[in-house]
Image (spheres, rainbow, N blue to C red):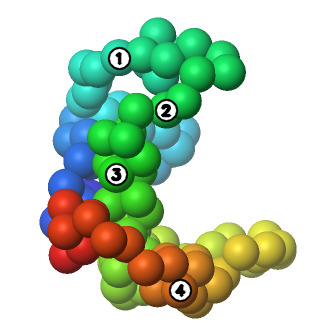
């Protein structure tokens, strides 16, 4: 996560990393659970959709050189190129979302 932190705004800070056994501890990010903001069957507030689209757009722009290699034997079903195409193909009218 440290590699993508400079490319993504809402990234929790890495506090501790251990290679063996492999685990990480990240800072707590306070906020409300979506189920509390709007219960089942209620529309999601627009600011949530804007935040999610912005976050996914930033993730799609992270250079491949800063993310770890996928372990051998893992089957990739969604490629970063496919994610980028999906984001690029969708036109946003809000200037808040556009970067």
Q: Classify mark 3: helix, strand or loop.
A: helix
Q: Nearer the viewer, residue 55 or 15?
A: 55
Residue at the spot 52% in from the left edge and 44% down from the top edge: 22
Q: Residue 49, can we see it?
A: yes
Q: Nearer the viewer, mark 1 or mark 3?
A: 3
Give the residue pinned by disc 3: 50
Residues packed near mark 4 inside 10 Å, few (<14), some (14 to 19) or many (20 plus): few
- Label 2 vs 1, first from the N-terminus: 1
Give the residue pinned by disc 2: 44
Q: Nearer the viewer, residue 19 or 33?
A: 33
Q: Nearer the viewer, residue 52 or 71?
A: 52
Residue at the spot 24% in from the left edge and 47% down from the top edge: 10
Q: Nearer the viewer, residue 24 or 47?
A: 47
Residues packed near mark 3 inside 10 Å, few (<14), some (14 to 19) or many (20 plus): some
Q: Decide if residue 78 is on the left or right side of residue 14.
A: right
Disc 4/disc 2 C-alpha distance (Å): 23 Å
Q: Position of residue 66 (x, y in %)?
A: 34, 78
Give the residue pinned by disc 1: 32
Location of residue 97 with respect to 21 vertically, above or below: below
Location of residue 80 with respect to 9 vertically, above or below: below
């Amino acid at each position: 996560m440290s590699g993508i932190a400079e490319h993504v705004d809402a990234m929790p800070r890495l506090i501790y990393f251990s290679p063996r056994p492999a685990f990480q501890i990240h800072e707590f990010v306070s906020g409300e659970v979506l189920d509390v903001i709007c219960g089942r069957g209620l529309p999601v507030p627009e600011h949530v959709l804007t935040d999610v689209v912005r976050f996914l757009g930033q993730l799609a722009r992270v250079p491949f050189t800063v993310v770890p290699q996928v372990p051998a034997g893992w089957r990739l079903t969604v490629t970063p190129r496919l994610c980028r195409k999906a984001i690029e193909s969708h036109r946003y009218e809000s200037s808040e979302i556009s970067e």
